[in-house]
Image (tube, helix red, strand yellow):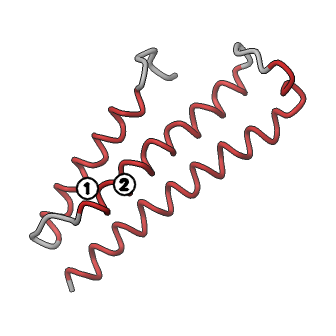
Amino acid sequence: MFPTISNMFIYVAITFAIIFIIYSLSVSKKLPILTDIFSIMLAAAAGYTGIELCYFVLEGTKALGDYEDQKLVIILGGISVFWVSLTTVLNSVKGLHQTAE
């Protein structure tokens, strides 16, 4: 499911930042502030990593060592990281619409 490219989250973060900048230019006709761009980048990287963590735990090919009995907690943590990242991205997009009005 996930490419074997190391540090794939960096490419995901940069892609989301570029999409956000283009979207901001089309909606509000100006560049977003740098903190919004970095918030999107961090949220995208964290969301990707949370999904990847869940995938690796569910797949079962990675040894978890002493944490083998904590799979459910690890999966819930990955899901919560993804959820917080998703809400951050959605709130940033909502903020664009509020400033455009």
For marks 1 and 2, the one nearer the N-term is 1
Left or right of 8: which side holds 49? right
Q: Residue at x 36, y 33 (%)?
A: 10
Q: Residue at x 33, y 54 (%)?
A: 38
Tell me where residue 43 appears, x and y as whole percent: 45, 51
Disc 2 marks a residue whose amino acid type is: Ile
The quarter holding residue 98 reads bottom left
From the viewer's perspective, is residue 53 above or below residue 46? above
Of badges 1 and 2, the one in the foreground is: 2
Tell me where residue 9 appears, x and y as whole percent: 42, 33
Q: Label 1 belongs to which residue?
A: 20
The quarter holding residue 65 reads top right
Q: Secondary structure at mark 1?
A: helix
Q: Residues within 10 Å of mark 2 (few under 14, many from 20)?
A: many
Left or right of 13: which side holds 27? left
From the viewer's perspective, is residue 64 above or below residue 22? above
**Callouts 1 and 2 close, C-beta under 8 Å:** yes
Tell me where residue 88 appears, x and y as whole percent: 46, 62
Q: Residue at x 22, y 66 (%)?
A: 33
Residue 40, disc: 2
